Image (tube, rainbow, N blue to C red):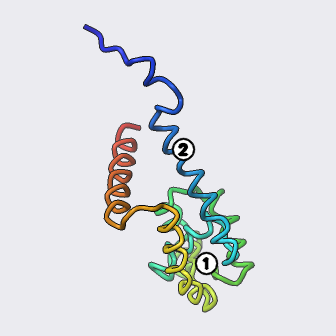
Amino acid sequence: MEMRIPDEEKKLERQLCFAVYATAHAFTRTYKPILDRLGLTYPQYLVMLVLWERSELSVKAIGEQLDLDSGTLSPLLKRLEQNGLINRRRDVEDERQVIVSLTAKGEDLKGELDSVMMAIGEAIGCSLEDMASLRDRLHALRANLSAAA
């Protein structure tokens, strides 16, 4: 006997993919005024998070960590460099690689991370444990989707 999905579950608001999509947009909208104070866009903030963990990385490594191609990443890096937050230079051992490092100004901006995270945590309105659980479930979902692709 073939399983049928109830019509109610076929509606847009019942789709998991739409819930994730709409939530991603809500996150971006919530981050915007917070990050505007720092002079960062959301994608730039993600790049800075990566660099605050490891102050120097290749463009390729940053792209892999954020799942961004170089065509998307290069303009972000250019703007961050224009704003004095990062430096880009060719790797002396491999001229094809571009190394990205934080400037002192970029390192100093890390001091704002607590206030950004507190503001987002307040907007989310759930406990650290709830956020950790949700994050872990989303990571598992992403891993399953990547494996299926």
Q: Is residue 40 left or right of residue 53?
A: right
Q: Is residue 93 above or below residue 71?
A: below
Which is more toward the observer, 32 or 86?
32
Residue at the extreme bottom: 104
Residue type at mark 2 is Tyr
In the picture, the disc for residue 145 is none
Cα separation, mark 2 vs mark 1, equals: 37 Å
Type of the residue with mark 1: Arg
x and y, in percent, of residue 139 in the image: 36, 53
Q: Earlier in the sequence, mark 2 or mark 1?
A: 2
Q: Residue at x 36, y 55 (%)?
A: 134
Mark 2 vs mark 1: give the one in front. Answer: 2
Which residue has dot 2 on it? 21
Residue at image position (39%, 44%) is 146
Q: Nearer the viewer, residue 32 or 42?
A: 32
Task: Point out the residue furthest to the top here.
Answer: 1
x then y, percent, for residue 142: 39, 48
Of helix, strand and loop, which one carries label 2?
helix
| Front-lying residue, 141 or 63 | 141
Specify few, some or many for label 2: CA neighbours under 10 Å numbering under 14, 14-19, or 20 or more: few
Q: Which mark is residue 90?
A: 1
Q: Quadrant of residue 73?
A: bottom right
| Position of the N terminus by quadrant | top left
Query: Badges 2 and 1: C-beta atoms under 8 Å apart?
Result: no
Q: Residues within 10 Å of mark 1 (few under 14, many from 20)?
A: few
With respect to residue 50, does 137 lie above or below? above
